[in-house]
Image (spheres, helix red, strand yellow):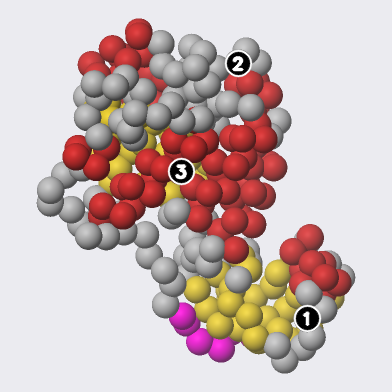
C-alpha cells in the first residue's frame, strides 16, 4: 500500500523516493494493481505509467480499510532515538492515532532540542510503517511537550504506566462499557521511571496509574505492551 498526496479525477500521483522504490526495487510495470491511500480512504489502483520521480495511477475501486478498535493517543517520554523510533513504528502498526513526545524530568538532557531536528525523519517512519500495516490514515506526530501540557490532554480513558508494584493492572482499569468512538491516552515514562513529583502531578490531573505486571520493562517494551492490552480490551 502507498500514500499519495491526493486523488482527483480518478487519478493519483506517487512522488519521490517511494515512486523510485516502486520502479527500481519492486520492478513494477504498467498494468499492475496496488492499494493506495490519500490518507483518508483506501483504493485499488492500476499503475499507468512512470515519469521522473513519480508514478501515475488510475483508481479502480474503493476498498475497506482496517479500523482501529478505538482512538488511541500515545504520549511517550523521550528516550534514546533508536528505541524511540522503534516505538513510533510499532505504535503505528497498533493503530495509534497520534503521538506526542514528552520531556520528563529523567529524560536525557538535550533530547527535546535534538527531537526537533528528527521530526522529518519521524514523519517518514510513520508513513512507511503505515503503508506496511495497510493503514488508510497514518498517525500524526506532534512536537515534544512538557509533562504539564501532556497531562492537559482530553480523553475518556487516560492512564500512565507506573512500575510501583501496588499499582493496579492496566486490564483491570479499562472501562466496562466500550465503543469504537472512545478515546484513550497512554502516557509512558522515561528510562529510570517517573519522578515522584510527576506521579503526583499526573494523579492530580486525573490520570490513572496502571501496571503491566511485576517485571520492570524497558520504556519501548512498556509502550507496545500497553497499546496491545488496550486495543485487545476494546475488541472484546
**Residue at mark 2 to residue at mark 1: CA–CA distance:** 44 Å
Mark sitting on residue 235? none
Residue 59 lies within the magenta run: yes
Q: Which residues are magenta?
A: 58-63
Describe the element under mark 3 as helix, strand or loop: helix
**Residue at mark 3 to residue at mark 2: CA–CA distance:** 21 Å
| 230 and 41: which is toward the camera | 230
Residue 15 pos. (x, y %):
75, 65
Q: Nearer the viewer, mark 2 or mark 1?
A: 2
Q: Is residue 56 above or below residue 97?
A: below
Mark sitting on residue 224? 3
**Residue at mark 3 to residue at mark 1: CA–CA distance:** 34 Å
| Residues under numbered marks 3 and 1 in contact, where contact means CB atoms less than 8 Å apart | no
Q: Is residue 1 above or below residue 190?
A: below
**Outermost left residue:** 177
Which residue is the site of mark 2? 108
Q: Would residue 154 appear left or right of 59 to someone viewing this image?
A: left
Q: Nearer the viewer, mark 3 or mark 2?
A: 3
**Outermost bottom residue:** 31
Q: Is residue 138 above or below residue 67?
A: above
Q: Is residue 9 visible?
A: no
Label 2 Cα neighbours within 10 Å, binned few <14 / some 14-19 / many ≥20 = some
Amino acid at each position: 500500500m502507498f500514500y499519495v498526496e491526493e486523488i482527483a479525477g480518478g487519478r493519483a500521483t506517487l512522488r519521490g523516493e517511494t515512486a523510485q522504490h516502486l520502479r527500481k526495487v519492486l520492478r513494477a510495470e504498467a498494468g499492475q494493481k496496488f492499494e493506495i491511500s490519500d490518507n483518508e480512504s483506501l483504493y485499488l489502483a492500476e499503475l499507468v505509467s512512470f515519469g521522473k520521480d513519480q508514478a501515475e495511477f488510475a483508481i479502480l475501486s474503493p476498498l475497506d480499510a482496517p479500523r482501529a478498535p478505538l482512538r488511541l493517543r500515545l504520549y511517550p517520554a523521550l528516550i534514546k532515538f533508536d528505541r524511540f523510533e522503534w516505538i513510533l513504528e510499532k505504535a503505528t502498526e497498533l493503530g495509534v492515532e497520534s503521538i506526542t513526545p514528552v520531556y520528563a524530568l529523567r529524560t536525557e538532557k538535550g533530547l527535546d532540542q535534538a527531537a526537533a531536528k528528527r521530526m522529518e525523519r519521524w514523519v517518514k517512519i510513520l508513513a512507511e510503517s503505515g503503508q506496511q500495516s495497510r493503514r488508510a490514515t497514518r498517525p500524526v506526530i506532534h512536537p515534544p511537550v512538557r509533562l504539564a501540557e501532556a497531562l492537559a490532554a482530553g480523553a475518556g480513558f487516560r492512564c500512565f504506566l507506573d512500575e510501583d508494584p501496588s499499582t493496579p493492572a492496566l486490564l483491570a482499569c479499562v472501562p466496562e462499557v466500550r465503543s469504537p468512538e472512545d478515546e484513550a491516552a497512554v502516557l509512558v515514562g522515561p528510562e529510570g521511571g517517573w519522578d515522584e513529583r510527576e506521579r503526583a502531578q499526573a494523579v492530580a490531573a486525573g490520570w490513572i496509574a496502571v501496571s503491566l505486571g511485576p517485571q520492570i520493562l524497558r520504556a519501548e517494551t512498556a509502550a507496545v505492551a500497553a497499546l496491545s492490552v488496550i486495543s485487545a480490551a476494546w475488541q472484546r
